[in-house]
Amino acid sequence: MSKNLIYCYSGSGNCLDIAKNIAKVLGDTDIVMMRSFPAVTDARNAERVGFVFPCYAGGLPGNVEQYVKTVTMGPDTYRFGVVSYSGYPGVGLKKISDIVRLDYWTGISHHCSCIWLFPHRLMVPTLSVKGAQKRSEKLAKKAAEEIAAKKKLDGEPGAFFLNALEAKAWPALSKKKAEKLTSDEQCISCGLCEKLCPAGNIRIVDGRPQFGKNCIGCLSCLQYCPAKAINMGGVTLKRERYHNPNTPAPELMKKVIHID
Ligand SMILES: Cc1cc2nc3c(=O)[nH]c(=O)nc-3n(C[C@H](O)[C@H](O)[C@H](O)COP(=O)(O)O)c2cc1C
């Protein structure tokens, strides 16, 4: 097993990019993806274990909380959490810390992937894709150096009660929004959306995606569609697509990524 393990959920690649940038500083790291049940849950021999994930509606995406509960660590394992968000970090770090007691945590803002709600440039502060990426890389490097030095923070991550309410309402809301997912005649029947969906919620029927009722709202299908054929209601027709410039779709689908 590698010296360090980073558990990562990523819908449009920002978190995977952050995890890779942290791993490059730490060296000898396995990034275990949490888009499905994690391939490695026994982390007792790891020196450092991290959790990198986005803020979704003030909380955490999909099954992340359940997956974190399956990870076993030693009593001396150094534990860290990093949340990626566009405007506010939400309650995700607190939720993770309630499960694994984090030693260190931080937030890194990046472009917004929730394009049915906001254009992706609506992040705080507003930056171009290049600018946001540069900033994210700088912040990930700073965090990684602190993680390498096993910096410990006092107390626990904060949680704003309105974000907790938002997170509670999200699963039902996301299912409702998912009823608006459609594909149009630009579809090239490549099947990428079906392969990418972390919830197994897309099936290709007669060359076109059909969307089920288990959508978790990550929008990987929409953001990575090479033909821009997937939309969520009328609003996304006019909005630019975004996925992290350093995260190609095949990488997002891997179970474990090793960084030397
Ligand atoms: C369904 C959904 C909900 C989101 N909710 C929030 C939010 O409540 N607050 C926020 O600041 N960003 C929110 N975002 C933006 C993401 O947290 C941000 O773009 C993050 O960098 C995405 O990481 P990823 O590319 O690894 O999926 C949301 C994105 C999605 C897709």
Image: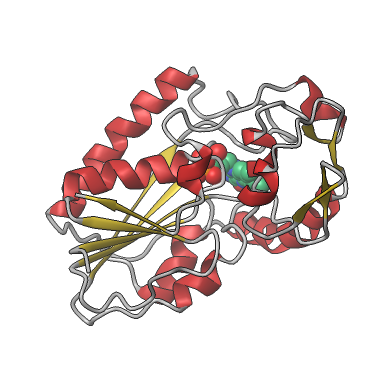
Q: Is residue 168 left or right of residue 19?
A: right
**Would you place residue 61 above or below residue 237 in this image?**
below
User: How many labels, in total?
Assistant: 0
Q: Residue 248: x and y, percent?
A: 48, 36
User: In the image, is residue 24 above or below residue 64?
Assistant: above
Q: Is residue 38 above or below residue 121?
A: below
- The quarter of the rendered structure image containing the N terminus is bottom left
Q: Residue pushed farthest left?
A: 149
- Check the image and name the residue furthest to the front: 206
Return the x and y of residue 255 as percentages of the image width and height: 44, 59
Look at the image and tell me whether residue 88 can be seen. no
Q: Residue at x 45, y 36 (%)?
A: 247
**Residue located 52% across and 70% down the image:** 37
- The answer, for residue 53, to whether it is visible in the render is yes
Which residue shows up at 32% across the image and 32% down it? 137
Residue at image position (87%, 45%) is: 206
Residue 7 figure quarter: bottom left
Whereabouts is ligand 1, in terms of quadrant? Answer: top right
The colour scheme used here is: secondary structure
In the image, taking residue 239 as reference, residue 244 lies left or right, namely left
Q: Quadrant of residue 131?
A: top left
Question: Which residue occupies the foreground of this view, 115 or 7?
Answer: 7
Of 205 and 179, the residue lying toward us: 205
Provide residue 159's location: percent of width, then percent of height: 50, 59
